[in-house]
Amino acid sequence: MSEKMKITILENGPYLVEGNVPLAEKINVLEGRRLHRFIDGRPLPQAETYRLCRCGQTKTPPFCDDAHLHIDFDGAETASTKPYRERAKAVEGPELTMLDDGRCALAKFCHRQKGNAWTLTLTSNYEGHREEAIHAACDCPTGRLTPLDENGNEIENSYEPSIDIMQEPLVRVSGGIFVKGGIPLYSESGKVYETRNRYVLCRCGKSYNKPFCDGIHVSAGFLDEKPPKKRKGLRRRKK
């Protein structure tokens, strides 16, 4: 990763992304009954430096258009700055330990065909459950869930540094900002949060755990681009 790559939270404003970080849109889709995966969305412009909206009101999503200046946006950071290991609780299974810090973006990657990450961990002595639990935990975009190997080391997917703008058509909303590959995140005060392999930033402006996503975009019905209005006076042609 380039030493220039970083994200800075601007006071009551956007996320400033520097260092030519690749940007993409990803759509959360369902395979079968429970397996979630990302597919490519629309192409997004690339730049050395860009600003991503944090207030949820931009008309040029996912980029900032200074809408925060006109809506009295309060972007005060409320998330804990304690390291992950201090915040997370251990879920102890017979053949696997998983850490859980409670941060959730409601992306549902923790669900697998044989159960969710917690159930699979608690039944990790059953055939195939340990591997399924690891998949369920490591695929969680927020980094909430982290399995540990026999030496207590964190098991992680390998990600190149990049940022994904998440779309959640299954629940008819737009999701958060999935940051991958250990990109440093600086607070508005200049302090750096603990660097993690994966985390999700809020972009609807309503999270109670700013700057991180807490899933409230679902209940808020957040859409970064409003669907087109139906034109009055037009009726569907009868076949």
Image (tube, grey):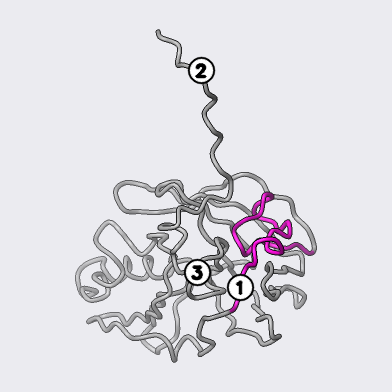
Q: The residue under label 1 is which amino acid type?
A: Gly
Q: Residue 234: which disc?
A: 2
Nearer to me, 4 or 191:
191
Give the vertical position of 128 relative to 95 (above or below): above
Q: Is residue 119 left or right of residue 209?
A: left
Q: The residue under label 2 is which amino acid type?
A: Leu
Q: Tag 2's secondary structure?
A: loop
Q: Residue 207: which disc?
A: 3
Residue pointed to by mark 1: 75
- Residue 53 in magenta stretch: yes
Q: The residue under label 3 is which amino acid type?
A: Ser
Q: Main secondary structure of the magenta part?
A: loop
Residue 193: x %, y % from top left: 60, 84
> Which quadrant of the structure image shows residue 3?
bottom right
Residue 47: x %, y % from top left: 78, 58
Local crowd size for mark 3, using a 10 Å CA cut-off: few (<14), some (14–19), many (≥20)? many
Stretch in magenta: 49-76
The CA span between labels 2 and 3 is 39 Å
Give the vertical position of 152 relative to 111 (above or below): below
Q: Is residue 147 left or right of residue 51?
A: left
